[in-house]
Image (spheres, coloured by chain):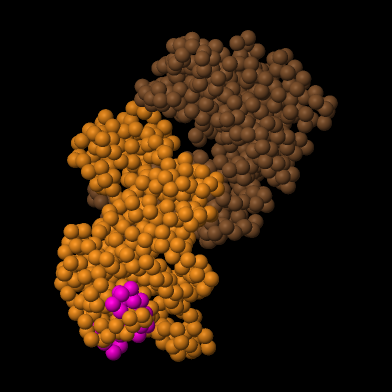
Chain colours: A orange, B brown
Amino acid sequence: MFKIRAVAIDTYPENTVFLPRHDSGYGAEQFQALRKIEICHDGTSILATLAIMDDEHLLQRGEIGLGEQAFRRLGLPEGTRVTIAQAKPPASLEAVRRKIGGDTLTDDEIAAIIRDVARHLYSPMEIAAFLVACAAFMTTDETLALTRAMANVGNRLKWDAPLVVDKHCIGGIPGNRTSMIVVPIVAAHGLIIPKTSSRAITSPSGTSDTMEVLANVDISVERMRDIVAHEKAVLAWGGRVNLSPADDVLISVERPLRIDTYEQMVASILSKKLAAGSTHLVIDIPVGPTAKVRSHNEAVRLRKLFEYVAGKVGITIDVVLTDGSQPIGRGIGPVLEARDVMAVLRGEPNAPADLRDRAVMLAGRVLDFDPRIKGGQGHARALELLESGAALAAMERLILAQGPQQQPMPLGELTFEVPAPRDGRVTAIDCHLIARIARLAGAPMEKGAGIDLLCKVGDPVGAGQPLYRIHATSQTGLNFACELAGEASGYTVAA
Amino acid sequence: MFKIRAVAIDTYPENTVFLPRHDSGYGAEQFQALRKIEICHDGTSILATLAIMDDEHLLQRGEIGLGEQAFRRLGLPEGTRVTIAQAKPPASLEAVRRKIGGDTLTDDEIAAIIRDVARHLYSPMEIAAFLVACAAFMTTDETLALTRAMANVGNRLKWDAPLVVDKHCIGGIPGNRTSMIVVPIVAAHGLIIPKTSSRAITSPSGTSDTMEVLANVDISVERMRDIVAHEKAVLAWGGRVNLSPADDVLISVERPLRIDTYEQMVASILSKKLAAGSTHLVIDIPVGPTAKVRSHNEAVRLRKLFEYVAGKVGITIDVVLTDGSQPIGRGIGPVLEARDVMAVLRGEPNAPADLRDRAVMLAGRVLDFDPRIKGGQGHARALELLESGAALAAMERLILAQGPQQQPMPLGELTFEVPAPRDGRVTAIDCHLIARIARLAGAPMEKGAGIDLLCKVGDPVGAGQPLYRIHATSQTGLNFACELAGEASGYTVAA
């Protein structure tokens, strides 16, 4: 029996428990060899990674320390008596081992793995093993089982409407913030589009990060229902409504490893749509040399996998292949993207045309799901709703309903302009590099950090003319971004 | 610039750096998203996992804390000024990603991965990704490249002799401590057998753990040379001589995941033998229902892989398939195994016959490498050296040369006898379960902990008669072991 004590150390995303070496009763090395221990109290328990505390001042005799994550997840007051035990590896790991050995898993086995992942019973190492084993070989039926399993472990939203539409981009293109234009267009038309989206994990901004510049996105399921009832739409952070907690855990390992298999992507996206209650979905797959999907053939394979799984889980899907050869719009990073989005909605003359055209096209495909719309007339209807100001009005109502942002969100005032190395023409922009530079500048955590693109592919430039401007809110952020931009700007300028 | 400060927290095996939240200059969340940072001073650097310190009393302004591993690995005094940077993922990870995608890697790519692994640039998650990708598909030439790469990153031992013999068991059978009998027999014959072995990672004892009950095993390369020059042999801990540092890192992930592919096993074993300068090698592959290799066909596939890679790297190999259906000997755990080994060498009447027979057989196969021995006469020669006491004398000299153990190593006095559930006959003993129970009792960290088998397969037992005795040195260890033994004893007793 130990008394718990909070230790003010943040080891995100892992739980950490601090055990005094002098007082463990059981040789600390023995626990150490196991690395993970289980902390139990009255039927509640969490798993935590073990650290041995050799500083005798930090913990009293008979105490164990819990890091911030562990203390929060256990949710008990300091001084509570707990017992500890060696963590038993989750039983579903046996199925993972069989998958590593090349076996095909049953629906039940996949469901058990996903349940244990959602309960944080897997370590990053074990998750990596599962993901890589799946990357080696995964049948379409396993992908389908994975999709269903992930949708089943979280919340499921239900909407009282025959048609609940959504639009999703597979990502990878900086500045491609079309959702914040598509949603108000579709809402203005009158279809229900309750859009939940993620925060950025490795990109410089997610739809939630950008929307948060304008309005609150941390919205409970109950308030989402209210808002959708009045506004037909919502633009909320999906993490709050816990639609696919297992997917959130898997993503925390997929991203640093850059495991981006089509099977994982399809299961991740469709499980969330299924849990969110979507009936009709437009998927945007950008194709380009630095995009996630690099050839037309690959895009077709991905499209077919989306269509197969969506069909089996009962979602009507329209997969659109789009130009993913360079960033969309000009701003990259939350404040800069919000600026572009509002410029398009307001019909400002300098609004980025590529962002506008892409959003109208996608909104048109969503509107084509409406049986009242004549075949192929979605695009014209979307354009009309944008040009008439109806979409802007819908967005303004949505911002009011969600709660306008109260914090000032200024653009980062520390700037650096990256110059063209020679006279010529911009022939390519590397989406991946531009995203990394924007991220180093501080996006998305620093809302005002990011990149403002001053030229796009095809533009003529003179030597020394600025290609893009880096915005940062701290000198360290600016330095990190400039360092990478100095090594590789992301722009190709040909004479 | 930060000043380093030692923080008395042990986060084995990972390096940890503690950064104060209030004083990082750069948003801690931004580092946090990256998880790993690089700590640099004058050309030296280490990578460490980031923890954010919210307790303002533990670190002064301008300080960063280093956990025990990180402080040791950086090797600089407290107060040294260091800079920090985001850790760049190792360049060789791109090859790992291609391997995940199903590619075959070149020798150079595998060498680069192994160099970066040895330098601790890979996280456990990244190592798991590499291992599982290799488990999915690996050519024999990749296995060969992996073997060479692992041998190349550590020390290489050279011996001034045409014949340097060794013997290795792939493991998995508790109590199978034949090396400590084979080595003195072979040394008594006069062949050079410089045996380095590992400590147990997930088993209840490694050869080094058991040998350490009798003598010092932490021996420098220079002293190894001296000892081998006089005694023809040594029984040393391989970790000290750093023969395959990359393999040690890979093993730290393979073991908890129980990734035990033949390719990894062959590369791991042969890289160490290559680095240790062995020219002739006997490999023992136990085959049994709870052993690592479970069928004759599998054993043959593994044998062929050993033969292919050994042939290419110039090691003469003799692969022996042995009975792996139950533990060998009676004692499991360092002190108990040392007792059995010495009983065999001393020719005591109650010495375990199976351990003795297995060791003599393997020693005979090693002696058959000697061109002066007539074909097939190795076994008789081995038996003669054991029975004459020559092997015991060789072992006694070796213990003196390595330095006899000065610490008392008593058997654990806390005991529990696991009873037979019914009258009948022992029909099976689960090697894997018995090993886990011995480990829970405290072996190998607690030398005196372990299991003493009182019956073996085929023995008649009466209900309640003890099957084995658990020895522990702490009540917690005894409780853990008894808990598992209560769930599943590892013995099958049929009426």
Observer able to see residue A433? no
At a point 20% along the width and 67% down the height, the residue shown is: A228
At a point 38% along the width and 51% down the height, the residue shown is: A149
Q: Nearer the viewer, residue B44 or B29?
A: B29
- In the displayed structure image, the side of residue A68 where residue B219 appears, left or right: right
Q: Residue B392 at what x, y percent from top left?
A: 66, 18
Q: In the displayed structure, would residue A283 be above or below residue A46? A: below
Is residue A352 located in the magenta-colored stretch of the structure? yes
Q: Nearer the viewer, residue A490 or B28?
A: A490
- In the displayed structure image, the side of residue A205 where residue B100 appears, left or right: right
Q: Nearer the viewer, residue B135 or B346?
A: B135
Q: In the displayed structure, would residue B243 be above or below residue B454? A: below
State which quadrant residue B464 falls in. top left
At a point 64% along the width and 14% down the height, the residue shown is: B346
At a point 37% along the width and 61% down the height, the residue shown is: A314
Q: Residue B80 at what x, y percent from top left?
A: 39, 53
Is residue B230 located in the magenta-colored stretch of the structure? no
Task: Give the magenta-colored segment's residue range.
Answer: A346-373
Q: Residue A156 at what x, y percent from top left?
A: 28, 55
Picture quarter with the N terminus of chain A? top left
Q: In the displayed structure, would residue A489 be above or below residue B123? A: below
Q: In the displayed structure, would residue B474 be above or below residue B196? A: above
Number of on-image labels: 0
Observer able to see residue A28? yes
Q: Residue B319 at what x, y percent from top left?
A: 70, 34
